[in-house]
Image (cartoon, rainbow, N blue to C red):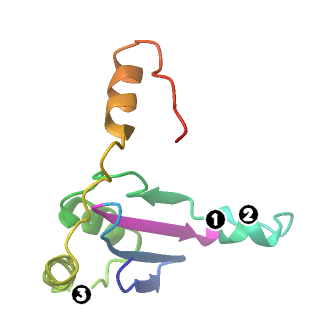
């Protein structure tokens, strides 16, 4: 994972960055209004919004930056350029040979039975 860029304001904090192994940009948002004293530490540290958790999910940082700005409007104007520079410095890593993650996802979306996992 690249450097995490963290911001806070307006009762929220967020982290945004580039994840080369997953070939995606990611965004995590914690909103203070959703955190209450009955929550344990793990619950408080789990983001309420978490985008960019699967391979290739967010190939463009602009939509994530737009969501981030709705929570923390003071995000710097050059964040997109910074994130794209990090992607160039650490390019996406292709899935390993034989990885059938995408094939399994497409079969699931098509309503087809799952393929059997084989162990080597």
The residue where tag 2 is placed is 43
Q: Nearer the viewer, mark 3 or mark 1?
A: 1
- First in sequence, mark 3 or 1: give its number: 1
Provide the secondary structure element on which disc 1 rests: loop
**Pointers 1 and 2 in contact (C-beta within 8 Å):** yes
- First in sequence, mark 2 or 3: give its number: 2
Question: From which residue to which does the magenta span run?
Answer: 23-33
Callout 3 crowding tier (Cα within 10 Å): few <14, some 14–19, many ≥20: few
The reply, left or right, for residue 119 in relation to residue 77 is: right
Gap between marks 1 and 2, in whole Å?
A: 5 Å
Most prominent secondary structure in the magenta stretch?
strand
- For this rendering, which residue is in front, 113 or 12? 113
Question: Residue at position x 35%, y 60% from top?
Answer: 22
Q: Nearer the viewer, mark 2 or mark 3?
A: 2
- For this rendering, which residue is in front, 8 or 106? 106
The residue where tag 3 is placed is 76
Farthest-out residue, right: 38
Provide the secondary structure element on which disc 3 rests: loop
Coordinates of residue 31 in the picture (x, y in percent) = 56, 68
Gap between marks 3 and 1, in whole Å?
A: 25 Å
The residue where tag 1 is placed is 46
Provide the secondary structure element on which disc 2 rests: helix
Image quarter (top left, top right, bottom left or bottom right) of the N terminus: bottom left
Q: Is residue 86 above or below residue 56?
A: below
Gap between marks 2 and 3, in whole Å?
A: 29 Å
**Number of the label disc, if any, that sits on residue 65:** none
Question: Residue at position x 81%, y 64% from top?
Answer: 39
């Amino acid at each position: 994972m690249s450097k995490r860029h963290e911001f806070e304001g307006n009762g929220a904090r967020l982290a945004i960055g580039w994840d080369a192994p997953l070939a995606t940009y990611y965004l995590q948002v914690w909103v203070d209004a959703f955190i209450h004293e009955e929550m344990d530490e793990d619950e408080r540290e789990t983001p309420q919004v978490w985008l960019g958790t699967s391979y290739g999910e967010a190939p463009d940082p602009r939509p994530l930056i737009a969501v981030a700005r709705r929570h923390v409007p003071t995000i710097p104007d050059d964040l997109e350029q910074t994130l794209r520079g990090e992607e160039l410095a650490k390019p996406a890593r292709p899935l390993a040979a034989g990885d059938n993650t995408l094939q399994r996802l497409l079969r699931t979306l098509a309503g087809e039975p799952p393929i059997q996992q084989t162990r080597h």
